[in-house]
Image: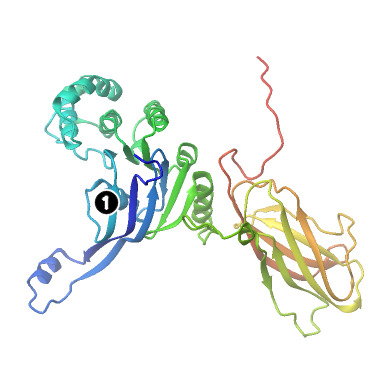
């Protein structure tokens, strides 16, 4: 397969369901001579498009009900789109629901052969694979018992063992690792890493976003049936976590959007207000600009503050900038007085810049407050809360809020 050709293409896919208030309404609608509608429509997916390329490990993120599982069922062919098209090239092996594809009356061994047939694998081919499958499942003598007697952990072990030992081109795992002990989860991740190194394309759904960040090289955030953002897994996980934590829109970059120039990404973002004519103020912040909103750890951040003084001269005028998390956890707040930086204090319009040469904050959305004060900061002349925000995303290299210089020493 040409690696430049997507192994999975999802083209403007919509999946619509009819929702009925009562079961009888479905019958009423089917028998209605006037074509009266008794249902409401719900789009589980709404014009979703994405490409996945051979060898990628892609994590799917999103709240329950966002459309992740529906998308996976469409890719595997369990469901068909209402509109749009999905093209999947190669053998797909999927773990979507515990026990899916298993006959509860069959033994574990019999279900292995049944799943093989469903994947187009002959009994003779499966004879060569069954020992490795049974060994991986590690459920002992239960392999000869009907699967209706299995615990959820046994289901997961057997389903995973079958899925990863049938030489898939595409492996789809939907929350399967949420079941089972840590030893089993480690075993599964190790095998998935092995398949990843062999060039198998993996679609991975987990509410444990750290698993997505660490295992996947790409991630797609699905929100209300469409792609909200896609890109490097660590960056998308940071955006998604910020959204989930703060309950507000994150600063995002849409999927596969390439700006015409880097200047577009680094263009200044301004917040401007009209200065008041009232004598109520003696100094006023009229404009705040950040050099860019989407940045990475150790990038330069420049906050430009424009302020206007209405008196001929003010004593002890100072400008302060504060960084907060969106839930108002205070991170850092320098000002020009404490750092002995003299700023213009005469009547008129003035501009000062606050520059962080290498911002040490890790992934997340952070808010910027700006204020002008006098009398060593005791008197607030004008304060702008949440006047700007920055979104920091990175490839996974550390955890926490801030990066601290450090070293490791091995003593023994």
Q: Quadrant of residue 388?
A: bottom right
In the rendered image, the vertical position of residue 321 relative to residue 273, given as above or below:
above
Query: Which type of secondary structure does the marked residue at label 1 adopt?
Result: helix
In percent of width and height, residue 399 lies at 59, 40
Outermost residue toward the front in this view:
2
In the rendered image, the vertical position of residue 333 relative to residue 373, given as above or below:
above
Q: Residue at x 77, y 55 (%)?
A: 355
- As rendered, which of 401 and 5 lies closer to the eye? 5
Q: Is residue 222 left or right of residue 376?
A: left
Q: Is residue 12 left or right of residue 116?
A: right
Outermost residue toward the top in this view:
412
- As rendered, which of 247 and 293 lies closer to the eye? 293
Image quadrant where one finds the C terminus: top right
Q: Tell how many labels.
A: 1
Residue linked to disc 1? 74
Image quadrant where one finds the N terminus: top left
Q: Is residue 107 left or right of residue 51?
A: left
In percent of width and height, residue 342 lies at 90, 62
- As rendered, which of 384 and 403 lies closer to the eye? 403
In percent of width and height, residue 285 lies at 76, 72
- As rendered, which of 98 and 198 lies closer to the eye? 198
Q: Residue at x 59, y 48 (%)?
A: 363
In percent of width and height, residue 373 lies at 82, 67
Q: Residue at x 33, y 54 (%)?
A: 10
Count neighbours of disc 1 (C-alpha within 10 A) and say few if under 14, some if 14 to 19, many if 20 or more: some
């Amino acid at each position: 397969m040409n690696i430049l050709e997507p192994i999975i293409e999802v083209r403007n896919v919509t999946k619509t369901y009819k929702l009925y208030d009562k079961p009888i309404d479905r019958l009423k609608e089917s028998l209605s001579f006037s074509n009266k509608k008794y249902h409401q429509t719900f789009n589980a997916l709404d014009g979703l498009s994405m490409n996945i390329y051979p060898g990628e490990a892609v994590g799917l993120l999103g709240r329950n009900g966002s459309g992740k599982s529906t998308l996976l069922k469409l890719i595997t062919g369990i469901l068909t789109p209402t509109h749009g098209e999905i093209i999947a090239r190669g053998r797909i092996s999927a773990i979507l629901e515990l026990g899916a594809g298993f006959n509860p009356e069959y033994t574990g061994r019999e279900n292995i052969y049944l799943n093989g047939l469903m994947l187009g694998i002959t009994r003779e081919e499966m004879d060569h694979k069954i020992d490795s499958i049974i060994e991986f499942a590690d459920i002992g003598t239960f392999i000869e018992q009907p699967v209706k007697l299995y615990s959820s952990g046994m289901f997961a072990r057997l389903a995973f063992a079958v899925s990863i030992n049938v030489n898939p081109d595409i492996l789809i795992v939907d929350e399967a690792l949420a079941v089972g002990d840590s030893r089993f989860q480690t075993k599964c991740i190790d095998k998935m890493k092995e398949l990843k190194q062999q060039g198998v394309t993996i679609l991975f759904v987990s509410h444990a976003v750290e698993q997505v960040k660490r295992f996947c090289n790409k991630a797609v955030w699905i929100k209300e049936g469409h792609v909200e953002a896609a890109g490097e897994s660590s960056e998308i996980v940071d955006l998604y976590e910020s959204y989930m934590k703060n309950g507000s829109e994150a600063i995002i970059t849409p999927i596969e959007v390439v700006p015409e120039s880097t200047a577009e990404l680094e263009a200044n973002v301004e917040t401007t207000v009209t200065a008041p004519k009232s004598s109520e103020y003696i100094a006023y912040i009229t404009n705040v600009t950040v050099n860019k909103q989407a940045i990475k750890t150790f990038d330069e951040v420049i906050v430009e503050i424009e302020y206007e003084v209405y008196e001929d001269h003010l004593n002890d005028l100072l400008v302060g900038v504060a960084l907060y998390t969106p839930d108002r956890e205070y991170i850092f707040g320098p000002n020009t007085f404490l750092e002995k930086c003299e700023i213009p204090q005469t009547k008129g319009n003035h501009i000062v810049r606050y520059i962080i040469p290498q911002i040490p904050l890790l992934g997340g959305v952070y808010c910027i407050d700006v204020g002008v004060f006098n009398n060593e900061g005791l008197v607030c002349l004008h304060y702008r809360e949440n006047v700007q925000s920055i979104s920091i995303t990175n490839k996974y290299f550390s955890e926490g809020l801030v990066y601290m210089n450090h070293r490791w020493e091995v003593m023994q």
